[in-house]
Amino acid sequence: MIDSREIIAARRFGEIRYSVTSETTGNLSRLLGKFGLMPDQSLLIELDRDSALQILITLLWKHMAYQGDCMPRQEAESLAQQILVEHETPGCRYFSNGNIAKNKSWNPLTESTFDSGLVITDPAKQNHFCLWFQDED
């Protein structure tokens, strides 16, 4: 099991939210609010697993403002794989506020200069996961 403190210590820069919560209504906006993010599901895009993995690798590996390494890429890849394996279930869905791995446009969900992350929803079990990164320039 991944310890959230391990991720925070490994990345070293910016702010990180690591949350697991239950939400029984299926309302994605309400879920975002529970994670402390702007409660507006229209700001999210749905992703396939491969895109979700690439976004997570990029966010662990690179500082959003300066593009410097936060950790070695190999470590980011390993952590990202572990996080997904731990939090995904059959039928889960992946969301982010843009594809930071492919381009630099996103819909902000915090007051920070830069923010992005991954939300994994599990409609069957009604347990949901969020790993969100915030950086300033």
Image (cartoon, rainbow, N blue to C red):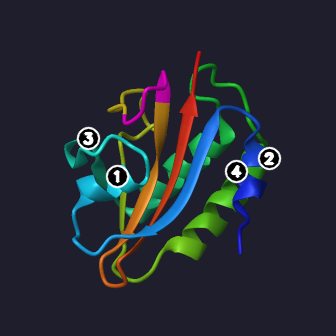
Front residue of this view, candidates 131 and 79: 131
Where, by quadrant of the figure, is residue 133 drawn? top right
Front residue of this view, candidates 2 and 62: 2
Q: Circle 1 is placed at which residue position?
A: 32
Q: Which residues are magenta?
A: 109-114
Q: Is residue 23 above or below residue 48?
A: below
Depth check, mark 4 against mark 2: the one in front is: 2
Q: CA distance from mark 4 to mark 1?
A: 25 Å
Residue 89: horizontal and vertical position, in percent?
Answer: 44, 80
Give the residue at x 33% y 59%.
31
Give the residue at x 42% y 33%.
110
Depth check, mark 1 against mark 3: the one in front is: 1
Q: Is residue 42 above or below residue 21?
A: above
Residue 106: horizontal and vertical position, in percent?
Answer: 36, 32
- Badge 4 crowding class, 10 Å Cα cut-off, few under 14, some 14 to 19, many 20 or more, is many
Decide which of tag 4 and tag 1 comes sooner along the chain.
Answer: 1
Q: Circle 3 is placed at which residue position?
A: 43
Q: Is residue 62 above or below residue 132?
A: above
Decide which of tag 3 and tag 2 comes sooner along the chain.
Answer: 2
Q: Circle 2 is placed at which residue position?
A: 9
Left or right: residue 49 compared with residue 41: right
- Badge 1 crowding class, 10 Å Cα cut-off, few under 14, some 14 to 19, many 20 or more, is some
Badge 2 marks a residue whose secondary structure is: helix
Decide which of tag 4 and tag 3 comes sooner along the chain.
Answer: 3
Badge 4 marks a residue whose secondary structure is: helix
- Tag count: 4
Decide which of tag 2 and tag 1 comes sooner along the chain.
Answer: 2
